[in-house]
Amino acid sequence: MNTRVCAIVVTFNRLETLKTAIAHVLEQTVRPAEIVIVDNNSTDGTREYLRSLQGQHSIHCIFMETNTGSAGAISKGMMYGLAKNAFDYFWIIDDDTFYAANALKDLIENIEETPFVMLGLHGANFRMGKKVRVKPAIKLQEAEYAMIDGAIIKTDVVRRIGPVCEAFFMMCDDHEYSLRIRKNGFRLGVLQNGADDRQLLGGSGQFSNATLWRGYYSARNHTFIIKMHFSVPEFIAYVYHQLKLLVMTAILAPDRVRRVKFRLLGIWHGIKGMGGRTLDPETLEFITEKNATPQTLTPQPGYINTGKTAIIK
């Protein structure tokens, strides 16, 4: 294949898992032209390990000064690839997913034979604001949403509509990107070939710390989506969904007061337009707004995040 792919690997404090993820990328039957690994200011030895790989096996490492979340790291990797002007596609990889050797080859072959500009391995359609999984029996199909982890995206489209919105930090960035792709007149699809082994290291347990901070960012970032892509049906669905989650949390959660507070703060911060890392996932402490910097909700090519809290107009 003459297709040139820039693989973007996002990592944060998962050194051993990252090593396995990189090995799977290097074992692809069709190798990426370049592997860009974006480290979100890890503190577990990841940075030292990546420095030993810099320049080997077409690997280029980017070291962030702060944790910008998956959205910030993906955006940074996309900006790097766009600046080189040498790639046909981006392949987005998280450090907790391992890919079969045929994963990239299958993605390239299928996206080049379809009208899709983004092709993911998992996806859904929206029904009154709720994601409904695509038909499991159909291997390749059009969808309204594609999970960005494992997805391949045409570089020309990223250049036209901009990279992933880094203001989201974590959660819902692929939801917004799927909407942005379709609102610009493009189509996306899902290839269900079982080529990915998702470790789901992002969190476990119904009432864990991970679901606490994810609930905050989900509520905040869904508010961003309503502001960016407003429609009456989606707004009604959003209000219903948030009320349902708040009621369920208030009834079922052992730490109900804290969880309801975090979700309500997420909604409020979304209304105020507070983007970026406003809640530290590790300490569960909120970050001050004192050094906030302006940031537009729809990112433009060339924008570089400062790592501070952003205000979304």
Image (cartoon, helix red, strand yellow):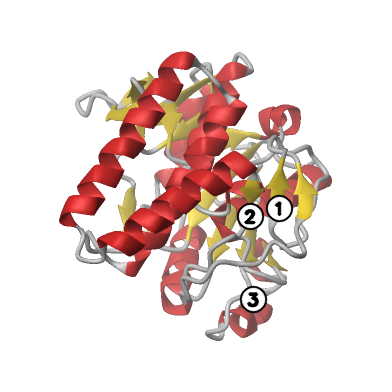
Q: In this orientation, does residue 248 appear?
A: yes
Give the x, y percent position of residue 27: 46, 60
Q: Secondary structure at mark 1?
A: strand
Camera-side residue of 210 and 64: 210
Residue drawn at the location 42% of the way across and 70% of the way down: 20
Q: CA distance from mark 1 to mark 2?
A: 5 Å
Callouts 1 and 2 close, C-beta under 8 Å: yes
Taking the image as shown, residue 157 lies to the left or right of residue 218, namely: right
Verify CB contact (< 8 Å) between mark 2 and mark 3. Answer: no
Indicate which label's residue lies in the foreground, 1 or 3.
1
In the picture shown, does residue 218 fall above or below 48?
A: above
Q: Position of residue 312 (x, y in %)?
A: 69, 42
The mark nearer the N terminus, 2 or 3, is: 3
Instruction: State the image coordinates of residue 164 (x, y, percent, origin top left).
Output: 63, 42
Q: Secondary structure at mark 2?
A: loop
Amino acid type for the residue under numbered disc 1: Ala
Q: Could you tell me the amino acid type at mark 2? A: Gly
Nearest the eye: 259 or 67 = 259
Where the C terminus falls, by quadrant? top right
Q: Is residue 213 left or right of residue 249?
A: right
Q: Is 86 placed left or right of 152 in the picture?
A: right
Residue 310's disc number: 1
Residue at horizontal 79%, vertical 48%?
A: 294
- Disc 3 residue type (three-letter): Leu
Residue 143: x %, y % from top left:
40, 22
Mark whose residue sits in front, 2 or 3: 2
Residue receiving disc 2: 276
Q: For mark 3, what is the residue?
A: 53
Q: Earlier in the sequence, mark 1 or mark 2?
A: 2
Q: Earlier in the sequence, mark 1 or mark 3?
A: 3
* Position of 290 relative to 273 (above/below): below
